[in-house]
Image (cartoon, helix red, strand yellow):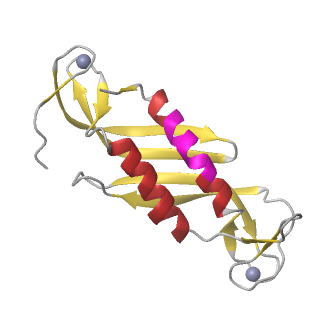
Amino acid sequence: MPTKPRRCPVCRGEASATTLDSISGEEGALALTIRKMPVLQCAQGHKMFVHSDFPLLLLDHLLEQDEPQLPASEAKGLVFKHFHCSACGAELAGDASDKRTFHVAVELLEQPTFDVDLTVPVHRCPKCGHEQMHTLKETRNRTPAALAHAFKSAQIAHD
Ligand SMILES: [Zn+2]
Ligand SMILES: [Zn+2]
């Protein structure tokens, strides 16, 4: 993956490719952790995205490709929402009290594949045992902020 030499926006030093072990952000009931995310880093340790489009592309990938693949309960009812098992249709209990971590693998901009863990409330169907995310909509709504918190915690500079 040839990346042309980039200058650090903070100190103007030359930046080279590396990966971040683990960065995390939380928003409401969603906790998001990114492992081995490719970044550029200068000799002084300032970090930056491999490409200015990277954060937006990652968000788009999660919202449009990864999260819709995860098992999620179906919300029914216009005013009073009730949730149904996506496998057997049984009605699920009101609260999703357990949490579970779903892993997705992301590849962007010809960079090495990295992992994203999404920890969300889940329901276990009382009838068939199928485990599923409380609501996909809620997870998707919280993803932009959780991702922003993760980037902020890692102090990734924008150029
Ligand atoms: Zn720097
Ligand atoms: Zn079920």
The residue closer to the viewer here, 137 or 128, is 137
Residue 135 lies in the magenta stretch:
no
Kindly identify the residue that appears in the image at 40 percent across and 53 percent down. 115
| Ligand 2: image quarter | bottom right
Farthest residue to the top: give it.
11
Looking at the picture, does residue 1 appear above or below residue 102? above
Kindly identify the residue that appears in the image at 67 percent across and 55 percent down. 138
Looking at the picture, does residue 123 appear above or below residue 144? below
The residue closer to the viewer here, 4 or 46, is 4
- Helix, strand or loop for the magenta stretch, by majority: helix
Q: Residue 68: which quarter of the image?
A: bottom right
Region of the chain picked out in magenta, as a range: 141-149
Q: Residue 151: which quarter of the image?
A: top left
Residue 148 lies in the magenta stretch:
yes
Farthest residue to the bottom: give it.
88
Q: How many marks?
A: 0
The picture places residue 81, in percent across and down from the top left corner, at: 84, 65
Q: Quadrant of the C terminus?
A: top left
Q: Is residue 127 left or right of residue 60?
A: right
Looking at the picture, does residue 53 appear above or below residue 71? above
The picture places residue 101, in percent across and down from the top left corner, at: 58, 56
The picture places residue 8, in percent across and down from the top left corner, at: 22, 22
Q: Is residue 82 left or right of residue 19?
A: right
Q: Is residue 18 left or right of residue 32?
A: left
Looking at the picture, does residue 116 appear above or below residue 159? below
The picture places residue 4, in percent across and down from the top left corner, at: 10, 38
Kindly identify the residue that appears in the image at 77 percent across and 83 percent down. 89
Kindly identify the residue that appears in the image at 72 percent across and 62 percent down. 134
